Amino acid sequence: MVAAVSPEVQERVREIVFLLMQRPITETIAMQVEAIEGFEHLEIVNGEWVGFEKDEYMAGEEHGRLEFKLLLSIGNHVEQHKLGMLYPGDTDFVLDGTPGDVRMARRPDIGFVRGQRVEKSKGYIYKAPDLAVEIISPSERPDAIQQKLNEYLDHGVEQVWQVYPETRQIVVNYADRTAKTYRVGDTIPGGDLLPGFALTVATIFEEA
């Protein structure tokens, strides 16, 4: 026998459905949705919610460990040389839209914004990051990975780093649509984006 659903649960479900159906998606609505347990990883594309496929946003220990190492490596350099701001994966970047109509919002695992472009805010960041880092899960579909990469580059991201834990590789995609793959034994230069920075790929994938 299936247990009866309490009126309180039914009401909560109705509230969630109502929020998800609201159009346009405003910043206020989006923040309310993200505050609901289980909906934290949803993103917005073409004014619609995406990310309901559970396997595409599940993040485990490996994902968290790699994100921490990258945040630490890049963040220490950014902070020491006052290059800008580094944001973790719970930060929303609105690539297209306004507070009243969020058309496209993405949450890179790491986002870097140059110092002269940083604008303090209590809400979303209404610009693309200069660097977006995405840790790729084995369950992510190639077409979804490519779509997100195109969105970043189309909206002015200078570099997109795609981190592949299974092959221990980091693919650096540039604004001119060229890309370079770095493996264990290689070093990723910071270049003009992160002056003076160099990331040894092995340090990111090595076990504790």
Image (spheres, rainbow, N blue to C red):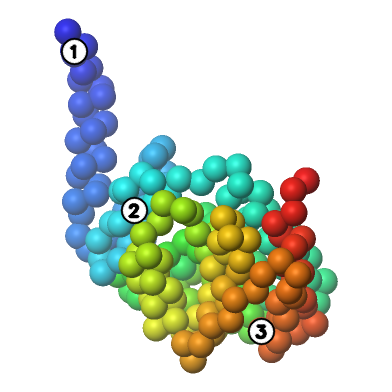
Task: Compare marks 1 and 3 and give the one earlier in the sequence.
Answer: 1
Task: Compare marks 2 and 3 and give the one earlier in the sequence.
Answer: 2
Any part of residue 87 in sight: no
The amino acid type, in three-letter code, at marker 1 is Val
* Distance Cα–Cα, label 2 vs label 3: 30 Å
The amino acid type, in three-letter code, at marker 3 is Leu
* Distance Cα–Cα, label 1 vs label 3: 57 Å
x 55%, y 43%: residue: 60
Would you name the residue on which mark 1 appears? 2
Mark 2 closeness class: few <14, some 14–19, many ≥20 residues within 10 Å: some
Task: Compare marks 1 and 2 and give the one earlier in the sequence.
Answer: 1
Q: What element carries label 2?
A: loop
Above or below, comparing residue 40 to residue 133 in the picture: above
Above or below, comparing residue 205 to residue 47 in the picture: above
Horizontal and vertical percent position of residue 144: 35, 64
Camera-side residue: 24 or 200?
Answer: 200
Would you name the residue on which mark 3 appears? 193
Q: Is mark 1 on a helix, strand or loop?
A: loop
What label sits on residue 51 in the rendered view? 2
* Distance Cα–Cα, label 1 vs label 2: 29 Å
Quadrant for residue 155, please give it.
bottom left
The amino acid type, in three-letter code, at marker 2 is Gly
Camera-side residue: 119 or 109?
Answer: 109
